Image: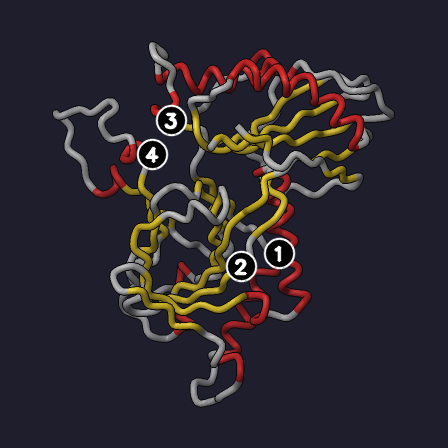
């Protein structure tokens, strides 16, 4: 168990939320909805998405015109695995547009996932024959993202969906029913890359892009920005100082570690504590939760179905009962945990 990055950063100004995962609930009423491996946010960038898309369209508008931005693309082909055209977004867009993109993604990662950074985003287009076959980006970061600039409703091609193996497929024999037949949709989830849709998923899940067929013009193909949310780390905002947050978390974290070590789960859990001016925790919100049971870590005689509730209940009990120094106002404290 790792408290993701032991240092705390304190931020006085609020960062606007792009989306809300779950509304804060009183601690005693928390119910486990299960791990969340996939999330989509439509209309993520707003006008900025149109700005970025326009840049791409203008640079491919005249096929006979030669200029540096037509020669910046890497045709990435790994036989039987990857086929696409890609470039670094930082060198393709102007400084203001790129900053608007990365600021929005970074703010989302901090506020909704407990991750304080993103990898340098790629810009990729897919035309006839392009695809990504199943793979997993485990070392890159806990969450992968795909931000679509595809004119999906106007497409003339087939394919292009993001495909992910369903968690039930990865745990196939649990609850197996020999009387029920299965088809592709029961085993694989497919996410359409609607224009300005942000798709965020657990990077451990095997995933890919279905083969694009029927379009050779880059402007008519699948166009996406993609990368990873990285560096899960604690941070706070509001009246509490960094030192006060550290002092308030020290005893609860020590008790938590003692209770759940060794944990029989793997994944990431990011929680946010809403702390009142009196220093008590008014609500505990689960921002991101990809925890699944790791059978290899189960103690003799332990039940697999008890492993996840044990960790979640311990987090609720110890962090929900944390006491911070009284302050001049409310604060929020984000604490991500990596179980690996």
Per the image, label 2 sits on a secondary structure element best described as loop
Judging by the rendered image, the residue that carries numbered circle 4 is 167
Query: Quick check: 88 left or right of 300?
Result: right
Query: Quick check: 133 left or right of 316?
Result: left
Per the image, label 1 sits on a secondary structure element best described as helix
Residue located farthest toward the right when viewing the structure as drawn: 328
Mark 3 or 1: the one toward you: 3
Comparing 84 with 251, the one in front is 251
- Give the Cα distance between marks 1 and 2: 8 Å
Comparing 51 with 317, the one in front is 317
Comparing 311 with 16, the one in front is 311
Question: Could you say which disc has been placed on residue 102 in the image?
Answer: 1
Mark 4 or 3: the one toward you: 3
- Give the Cα distance between marks 3 and 1: 34 Å
Above or below, 117 against 308 in this view is: below
Q: What is the crowding at mark 2: few (fewer than 14 residues within 10 Å), some, or many (at least 20)?
A: many
- Give the Cα distance between marks 4 and 1: 30 Å
Say whether marks 1 and 2 touch (CB < 8 Å).
Answer: yes
Query: Quick check: 310 left or right of 297?
Result: right
The answer to which of marks 4 and 1 sits earlier in the sequence is: 1
Judging by the rendered image, the residue that carries numbered circle 2 is 121
- Give the Cα distance between marks 4 and 2: 26 Å
Judging by the rendered image, the residue that carries numbered circle 3 is 294
């Amino acid at each position: 168990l790792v408290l993701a990055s032991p240092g705390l950063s304190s931020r006085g100004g609020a960062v606007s939320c792009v989306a809300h995962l779950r509304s804060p609930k009183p601690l005693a009423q928390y119910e486990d909805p299960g791990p969340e491996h996939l999330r989509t946010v439509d209309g993520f960038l707003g006008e900025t998405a149109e700005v970025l898309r326009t840049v791409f369209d203008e640079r491919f508008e005249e096929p006979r015109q030669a200029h540096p931005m037509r020669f910046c693309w890497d045709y990435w082909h790994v036989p039987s695995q990857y086929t696409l055209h890609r470039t670094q977004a930082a060198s393709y867009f102007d400084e203001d547009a790129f900053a608007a993109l990365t600021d929005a993604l970074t703010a989302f990662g901090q506020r909704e996932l407990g991750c304080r950074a993103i990898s340098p985003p790629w810009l990729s287009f897919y035309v006839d024959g392009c695809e990504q076959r199943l793979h997993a980006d485990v070392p890159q970061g806990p969450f992968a993202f795909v931000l679509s600039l595809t004119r999906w409703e106007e497409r003339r091609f087939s394919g292009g969906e993001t495909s992910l193996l369903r968690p039930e497929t990865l745990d196939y024999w649990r609850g197996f029913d020999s009387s029920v037949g299965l088809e592709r949709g029961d085993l694989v989830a497919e996410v359409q890359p609607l224009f300005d849709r942000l798709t965020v998923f657990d990077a451990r899940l095997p995933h890919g892009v279905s083969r694009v067929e029927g379009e050779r013009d880059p402007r008519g193909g699948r166009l996406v920005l993609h990368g990873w949310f990285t560096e899960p780390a604690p941070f706070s905002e509001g009246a509490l100082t960094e030192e006060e947050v550290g002092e308030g978390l020290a005893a609860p974290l020590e008790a938590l570690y003692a209770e759940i070590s060794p944990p029989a789960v793997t994944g990431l859990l990011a929680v946010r504590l809403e702390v009142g001016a009196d220093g008590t925790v008014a609500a505990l919100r689960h921002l991101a939760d990809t925890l699944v049971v790791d059978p290899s870590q189960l103690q003799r005689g332990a039940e697999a179905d008890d492993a996840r509730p044990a960790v979640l209940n311990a987090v609720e009990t110890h962090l929900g009962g944390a006491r911070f120094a009284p302050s001049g106002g409310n604060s929020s404290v984000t604490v991500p945990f990596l179980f690996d």
